[in-house]
Image: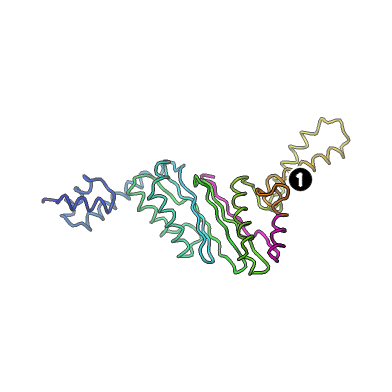
């Protein structure tokens, strides 16, 4: 049967498949555009299965805050070219919007299907590697930041004793600055109480070996080790680091200052930090 060029063109625009593939699908479907689209989709999904073991080391971090929900997501692909593709970028935005709409707090089948649809068109292995969501109370404020290369991003949630303080511009600005700080310094922990005893003991052993040959009394060496532990924890814990916008004070100290200015007590309730591939 004769297949019109206009039908092939219309199917190609709808599916993103090649001209010859569209023509073959239309021939196979007897000219039925809907059936041809289904054929192409099935073939695309089969090809997607074959590509599933390809490494997806490129991609983007995407985040959205809307109403009382915030979502952050990592979408991955094989090449940097696709990571910068406008359709891939738009898909990331659509995924976090759908996650907020459906109140998803993990990768769901519905979200994965959104990714598969684009993967079959672009013919590259793609995944939603991870997704986290936060439900915000009325006294919470969430700021987000995605770095310019979209390879790192963060959500920072502040909570206030006085719920009206979350509308204070200084509180909002501070929350955003905390996001900038996190991406710039990538602390391993938010607070020291999150650091495991095993990790501290491991560091202690390292520092004890460093001072072992010092010609000093054992109690002096022990004091030096404790000082090194304290310094190390301050370097890897967000609340103890010098604040990115005022390095004369720690993040914790700046948090107290902003709280006093806003007439409330503030606390960092949650931080979700993503780096591509990590």
The single residue placed furthest to the right in the displayed view is: 217
Picture layout, residue 218 above or below residue 230: above
Picture layout, residue 69 above or below residue 93: below
What percent of the width, then of the height, locates residue 133? 53, 60
What percent of the width, then of the height, locates residue 236? 68, 46
Residue 267 falls inside the magenta stretch = yes
The residue labelled by disc 1 is: 230
What percent of the width, then of the height, locates residue 227? 79, 42
On the picture, is 221 further left or further right than 71?
A: right
Residue at screen point 83% across, 31% down: 214
What percent of the width, then of the height, locates residue 234? 72, 46
Crowd class of label 1 (few under 14; some 14 to 19; many from 20; radius 10 Å): few
Residue at screen point 11% across, 50% down: 2
Residue 18 falls inside the magenta stretch = no
Residue at screen point 18% across, 57% down: 32
On the picture, is 242 further left or further right than 222?
A: left
Picture layout, residue 208 above or below residue 125: above
How many numbered dots are placed on residues in this image? 1
Residue 76 vs residue 161, the one in the foreground: 161
On the picture, is 179 further left or further right than 259?
A: left
Q: Secondary structure at mark 1?
A: helix
Q: Could you tell me which quadrant the C terminus lies in?
A: top right
The single residue placed furthest to the left in the displayed view is: 1
Residue 136 vs residue 116, the one in the foreground: 136
Magenta part of the protein: which range? 254-278
Residue 88 vs residue 39, the one in the foreground: 88
């Amino acid at each position: 049967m004769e297949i019109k060029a206009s039908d092939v063109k219309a199917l190609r625009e709808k599916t993103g498949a090649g001209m010859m593939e569209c023509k073959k699908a239309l021939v196979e479907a007897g000219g039925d555009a809907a059936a041809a689209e289904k054929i192409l989709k099935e073939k695309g999904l089969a090809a997607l299965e074959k590509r599933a073991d390809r490494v997806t080391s490129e991609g983007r971090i995407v985040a959205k805050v809307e109403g009382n929900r915030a979502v952050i997501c990592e979408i991955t692909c094989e090449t940097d070219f696709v990571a910068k593709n406008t359709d891939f970028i738009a898909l990331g935005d659509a995924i976090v919007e759908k996650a907020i709409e459906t109140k998803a707090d993990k990768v769901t089948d519905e979200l994965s299907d959104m990714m598969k649809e684009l993967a079959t068109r672009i013919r590259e292995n793609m995944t939603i590697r991870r997704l986290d969501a936060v439900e915000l109370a009325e006294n919470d404020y969430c700021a987000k930041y995605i770095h310019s290369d979209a390879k790192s991003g963060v959500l920072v949630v502040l909570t206030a004793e006085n719920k009206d303080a979350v509308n204070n511009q200084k509180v909002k600005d501070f929350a955003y600055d905390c996001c900038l700080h996190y991406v710039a310094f990538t602390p391993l922990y938010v607070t020291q109480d999150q650091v495991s005893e095993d990790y501290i003991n491991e560091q202690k052993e390292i520092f004890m070996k460093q001072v072992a040959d010092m010609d000093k009394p054992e109690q002096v060496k022990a004091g030096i080790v404790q000082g090194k532990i304290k310094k190390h924890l301050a370097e890897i814990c967000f609340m103890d680091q010098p604040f990115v916008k005022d390095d004369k004070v720690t993040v914790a100290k700046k948090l107290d200052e902003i709280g006093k200015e806003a007439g409330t007590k503030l606390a960092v309730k949650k931080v979700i930090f993503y780096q591509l591939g990590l």
